[in-house]
Image: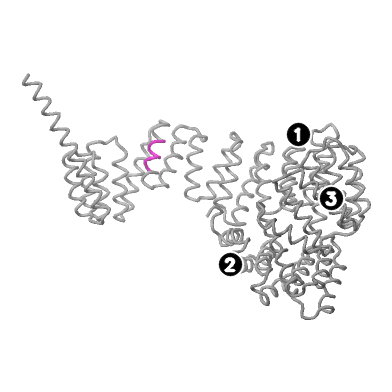
């Protein structure tokens, strides 16, 4: 029984001792947090002597923070002698020498460890990880590279080295490691592209990758992963034709279905590299009707030509050629629920670019009569037909279609769009009272864009009716606005210029400036639009269009005139001068990106 009580007593004493040590450890950590490091050191030293190695790391780190290098060296050397096979103590001793400024001594220890590296993959990885945890990236890399030699396998530790090179931002080594790694691990190509995009800082870095890839392709022309990565590299440098050339060459060599070319063409279209995308789609079409991408490529080819024409400067011959392409597509595949999208695009081309309103009207009327059309596509076609009716001086037919779509899609963004088009039709035709009633509802629309446009139009009407209850000047302006919508710039400008002559001293000066700016932007004449938008900001800084003009200036400088410095200035004006603007969030995001902040900041 006495023996039993003796054991219990010893257990309780031991437990009490552990609790006491825990309390002292917490107290030491609190001293450190309060900046009372010498007090913390006294406790850590006491605990270390009581329980030796358990508290070593606390003790040694505190010694180093107080620059007590001799004591840290003495303590650590004893543990090195006591545990000659424990690498951590040797690494810590090297770290002590490094902090003393004695790099030769530190490197001598590390080099000796490197020289005596065991031929064991797990031990090599553990040792490298210990160096990494001690913030010694260079020796972690050396351990892995020496480990490859020891184990006679150059493929080992590739993933670990990739992470270390990325952490160190060693672009040359990261590039070479990935190019060694990817041929046998092609699924990692997306990760490689992401890492390159993260650490590459300019053209010189991408040129480094390009040179390395070209060397690899010359050495191993059958390896497909290198041309794939080279295609991506060309895309980053906006060398779109070269990117497509690589993709086409690889597709021909592999005699594949061209899916990678198809996906690249979609990216090229998004990047507004329309000519390259068109060339890619034409290649896919040459593979013949049996190719699974024949029909998608034909459709995307015409869509891309459409974008090229409608978003850039073009000649009348370009429009007629595009019209012929759509007609040929409808002739080849027929007019049915699978080709309604082409009928819709052709009708829009005829209505707004070729001004063949009767042809567009007939085409859309036949489109909405086709059975089994998707509900959303049918609604789009009806809204477009309503627009064509409006341009073709058939306002009653237009309002019936708009109202029909609004009724068929209650409480949706489609219904709000239809209601807004109805309100604009009333505004275009001078029925400002009815337009105001619709716009008053729409200013609370769930679609922020429609709500903002509705509010702007409502304010435009209210401001001008308040000054001139007859709205005579506003009616001319509204007709000019309709001509802008119809892409009839000459007629619109004639109407706008007549307003000041007929109604001198009218309140539409900033509205006229904005309308003329929109015409110039529609014509891709961005340089001439800039002074008009600046005049809105200078002469009418508190009026309706001021914040819109400022944001448009930022967008034009950033995306059309390639002047990032000016773009930043104008985006910052939105942030500082118009904090309540609809554009505030987008302006802030763009400003930060141009300043060089990370995208998620």
Neighbours of disc 3 within 10 Å: few (<14), some (14-19), many (20+): few
Residue 517 appears left or right of 114: right
Q: Which element is circle 2 on?
A: helix
Which x, y percent locates residue 207?
63, 53
Which x, y percent locates residue 594?
59, 61
**Magenta stretch encompasses residue 142:** no
Instruction: Residue under label 2, please give it.
Output: 572
Neighbours of disc 2 within 10 Å: few (<14), some (14-19), many (20+): many
Q: Which element is circle 1 on?
A: loop
Between 320 and 537, the residue placed more toward the observer is 537
Q: CA distance from mark 3 to mark 2?
A: 44 Å
- 3 or 2: tag closer to the N-terminus: 3
Instruction: Residue under label 3, please give it.
Output: 400
Instruction: Residue under label 1, please give it.
Output: 256
Up the image or down, 96 lies above or below 492; here it is above
Q: CA distance from mark 3 to mark 1?
A: 51 Å
Picture quarter containing residue 389? bottom right
Most common SS among magenta residues: helix
Residue 26 appears left or right of 112: left
Up the image or down, 301 lies above or below 577; here it is above
Bounds of the magenta span?
Answer: 125-131
**Label 3–label 2 contact, CB within 8 A:** no
Instruction: Count how many numbered circles sit on residues in the image.
Output: 3
Which x, y percent locates residue 9?
10, 28
Between 265 and 157, the residue placed more toward the observer is 265
Residue at 90% across / 51% down in the picture? 321
Up the image or down, 394 lies above or below 177; here it is below
Q: CA distance from mark 1 to mark 2?
A: 49 Å
Which x, y percent locates residue 215?
64, 45
- 1 or 2: tag closer to the N-terminus: 1
**Label 3–label 1 contact, CB within 8 A:** no
């Amino acid at each position: 029984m006495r023996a039993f009580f003796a054991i219990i007593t010893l257990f309780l004493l031991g437990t009490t001792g552990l609790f006491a040590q825990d309390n002292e450890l917490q107290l030491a950590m609190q001293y450190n947090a309060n900046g009372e490091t010498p007090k913390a050191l006294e406790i850590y030293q006491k605990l270390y002597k009581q329980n030796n190695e358990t508290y070593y790391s606390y003790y040694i780190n505190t010694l180093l923070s107080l620059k007590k290098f001799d004591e840290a060296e003495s303590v650590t050397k004893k543990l090195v002698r006591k545990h000659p096979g424990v690498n951590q103590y040797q690494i810590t001793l090297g770290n002590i020498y490094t902090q003393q400024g004695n790099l030769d001594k530190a490197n001598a220890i590390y080099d000796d460890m490197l020289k005596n590296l065991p031929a064991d993959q797990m031990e090599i990885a553990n040792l490298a990880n210990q160096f990494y945890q001690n913030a010694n990236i260079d020796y972690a890399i050396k351990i892995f590279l020496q480990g490859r030699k020891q184990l006679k396998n150059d493929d080992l530790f590739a993933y670990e080295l990739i992470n270390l090179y990325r952490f160190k931002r060693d672009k040359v080594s990261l590039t070479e490691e990935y190019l060694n790694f990817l041929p046998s691990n092609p699924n990692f190509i997306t990760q490689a592209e992401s890492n390159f995009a993260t650490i590459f800082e300019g053209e010189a870095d991408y040129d480094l990758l390009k040179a390395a890839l070209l060397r690899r392709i010359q050495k191993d022309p059958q390896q497909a992963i290198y041309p794939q990565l080279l295609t991506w590299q060309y895309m980053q440098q906006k060398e779109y034709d070269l990117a497509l050339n690589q993709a086409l060459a690889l597709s021909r060599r592999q005699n594949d279905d061209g899916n990678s070319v198809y996906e690249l063409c979609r990216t090229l279209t998004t990047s507004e590299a329309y000519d390259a995308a068109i060339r890619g789609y034409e290649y896919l079409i040459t593979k013949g009707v049996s190719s699974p991408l024949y029909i998608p490529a034909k459709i995307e080819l015409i869509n891309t030509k459409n974008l090229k024409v409608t978003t850039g400067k073009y000649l009348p011959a370009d429009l007629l050629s595009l019209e012929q392409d759509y007609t040929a597509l409808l002739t080849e595949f027929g007019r049915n629920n699978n080709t309604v999208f082409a009928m819709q695009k052709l009708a829009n081309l005829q209505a707004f670019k070729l001004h063949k309103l009767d042809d567009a009207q007939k085409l859309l009327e036949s489109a909405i009569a086709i059975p089994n059309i998707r509900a959303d596509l049918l609604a789009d076609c009806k809204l477009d037909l309503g627009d064509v009716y409006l341009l073709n001086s058939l306002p009653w037919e237009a309002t019936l279609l708009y109202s029909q779509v609004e009724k068929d899609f209650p409480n949706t963004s489609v219904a709000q769009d239809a209601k807004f088009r109805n309100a604009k039709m009333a505004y275009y035709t001078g029925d400002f009272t009815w337009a105001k009633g619709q716009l008053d509802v729409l200013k609370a629309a769930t679609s922020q864009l429609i709500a903002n446009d509705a509010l702007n139009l409502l304010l435009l009407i209210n401001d001008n009716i308040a000054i001139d209850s007859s709205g005579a000047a506003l009616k001319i302006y509204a007709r000019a606005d309709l001509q802008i919508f119809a892409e009839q710039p000459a007629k619109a400008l004639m109407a706008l210029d007549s307003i000041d002559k007929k109604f001198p001293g009218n309140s539409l000066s900033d509205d006229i400036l904005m309308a003329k700016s929109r015409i110039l932007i529609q014509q891709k004449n961005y340089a001439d639009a800039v002074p008009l938008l600046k005049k809105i900001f200078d002469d009418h800084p508190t009026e309706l269009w001021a914040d819109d003009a400022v944001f448009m200036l930022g967008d034009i400088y950033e995306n059309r005139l390639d002047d990032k410095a000016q773009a930043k200035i104008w985006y910052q004006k939105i942030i500082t001068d118009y904090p309540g603007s609809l554009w505030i969030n987008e302006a802030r995001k763009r400003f930060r990106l141009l300043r060089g902040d990370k995208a998620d900041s």
